Amino acid sequence: MRLRDARTRIELIDRALCLRLLANDEVGRLAVVVGGTPVIFPVNYVLDGEVIVFRTAPGTKLDAAGRSPASFEIDSFDRGTRHGWSVVVTGRLEEVDEHGTKELERMRALSVSPWADGEREHFLRLMPDRITGRRVGSDAVLPDGQDRSRGT
């Protein structure tokens, strides 16, 4: 059964589909709070179960680990038809370092390869508290090729 907001007609995407969408993408936006102001960074990532994993250099993203909640978002939109979807993950950002040897080895095995130049030796992960998705436009086809409006 599809869930829709009665007022906006925006469809809610269930958690399982949100995770499939996250697993099939590799670039998203990380939002952290710096000095009371939200800041958003594009990052390439890999999904590890329900956890968003990416690499970074020292700086704002690394400094945000463990300090405050963070959010991560992916989306796809067709501006011509005004249809699209988005998935948002909220939780806490934490660094995986040499103190978590087994976890660090697993992170390295995930093969997340930063697009940006320069060294990105620090592994960060977003531990989710909440994973939500929304879809607008009754004919929006999701990346798995299924059009939810037609029940396929």
Image: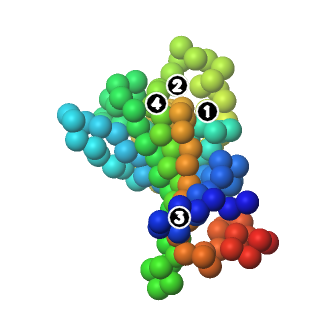
How many C-alpha atoms fall within 10 Å of the one at disc 2: few (<14), some, or many (≥20)?
many
* Pointer 1 residue: 107
Can you name the residue that lies furthest to the front here?
6
Local SS, label 1: helix
Residue 15 vs residue 126, the one in the foreground: 15
**Dot 4, how many residues are within 10 Å of its Cα: few (below 14), some (14-19), or many (20+)?**
some
Residue 64's disc number = none
**As drawn, is 79 to the left or to the right of 17?**
left
Q: Nearer the viewer, mark 3 or mark 1?
A: 3
Specify the amino acid type for callout 1. Answer: Met
Q: Say which element carries label 3.
A: loop
Per the image, the residue denoted by label 3 is 6
**Residue 150 versus residue 29: which sits nearer the camera?**
150
Q: Are marks 4 and 3 in contact (CB under 8 Å)?
A: no
Q: Disc 2 marks which residue?
A: 96
Discs 1, 2 touching: Cβ within 8 Å: yes
